[in-house]
Image (cartoon, rainbow, N blue to C red):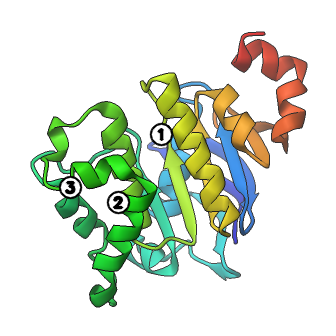
Amino acid sequence: MLELSDIDVHYGKNQVLKRVGLRVNDGEVVALVGANAAGKTTTLRTIMGLKRSTSGAIVFDSQTINDATTAARVHHGIVLVPEGRQIFPKFSVAENLLMGAYHRGDRNRVDGDIDALFELFPRLRERRGQKAGSMSGGEQQMLAIARGLIAKPRCLLLDEPTLGLAPLIVQEIARIVRMLAGKGMAILLAEQNAAMALGVADRAYVLETGRVSLEGTGADLTRDEAVRRNYLGT
């Protein structure tokens, strides 16, 4: 579904990604694990076209998309749920979801899809008329994910979805990620919470100072001594 090959990215003279390569298949959860400033967010922004790569190739569904606009990538089926949620705080829950569907041509089906999302996120149904900025952090994160899903992605990029959230909410997000993958969605999950990420991932990449240092199944990396020492605290 999605493949990055030898991606380099610079901010001015500072190189932040160095020959990064990864792939995400249909129905697969792939984790991108690393410390703060390792390059995880830059990787996702580059996939979305929010940041241009200096070299390398981004291929989605067998098409090279390096020159595609961000809007075109969304139309192709790549959707980013950004770090920090970035919801519209003065809009209601329902209005935030409608904003997520802005590019869709089948507007007559949006209401039905919103109802389906309320089944997935029952708390949002209770809050549908409430201003998003007045909700808890966990509720706002659920809204951010739901807003991404209303765009009907084929590949969902999640940037630090559990940051600052209570353990019960983290577990719920992990459950939802696995459920979405079970329905065939490709998911790339960037996380500092390595325990959560590796626990939910089919495969994972460890990113260190802009370079992939390790890759393997989530289970294999969980057992890796360096990963356990540096990221799992065991």
Q: Which residue position is annotated with label 3?
A: 128
Q: Looking at the picture, which amino acid does disc 1 mark?
A: Pro
Residue positioned 48% across, 40% down in the render = 161
Left or right: where 70 falls relative to 219: left
Quick one: label 3, few (<14), some, or many (20+) residues within 10 Å? some
Q: Please, what secondary structure does the residue beneath circle 2 have?
A: helix
Q: Please, what secondary structure does the residue beneath circle 3 have?
A: loop
Q: Do residues under tags 3 and 1 come within 8 Å of each other at their CB atoms?
A: no
Q: Please, what secondary structure does the residue beneath circle 1 have?
A: loop
One can see residue 139 in this view: yes
Q: Position of residue 125 (x, y in %)?
A: 28, 55
Left or right: where 206 falls relative to 78: right
Q: Looking at the picture, which amino acid does disc 3 mark?
A: Arg
Residue positioned 40% across, 63% down in the render = 117
Q: Which residue position is annotated with label 2?
A: 147
Q: Which residue position is annotated with label 1?
A: 161
Residue positioned 12% across, 54% down in the render = 91
Q: Do residues under tags 3 and 2 come within 8 Å of each other at their CB atoms?
A: no
What is the distance, in whole Å, between disc 1 and disc 2 at their CAs?
13 Å
Instruction: Please tell me which of labels 3 and 2 falls first in the chain.
Output: 3
Q: Looking at the picture, which amino acid does disc 2 mark?
A: Arg
Quick one: label 2, few (<14), some, or many (20+) residues within 10 Å? many
What is the distance, in whole Å, between disc 3 and disc 1 at their CAs?
21 Å
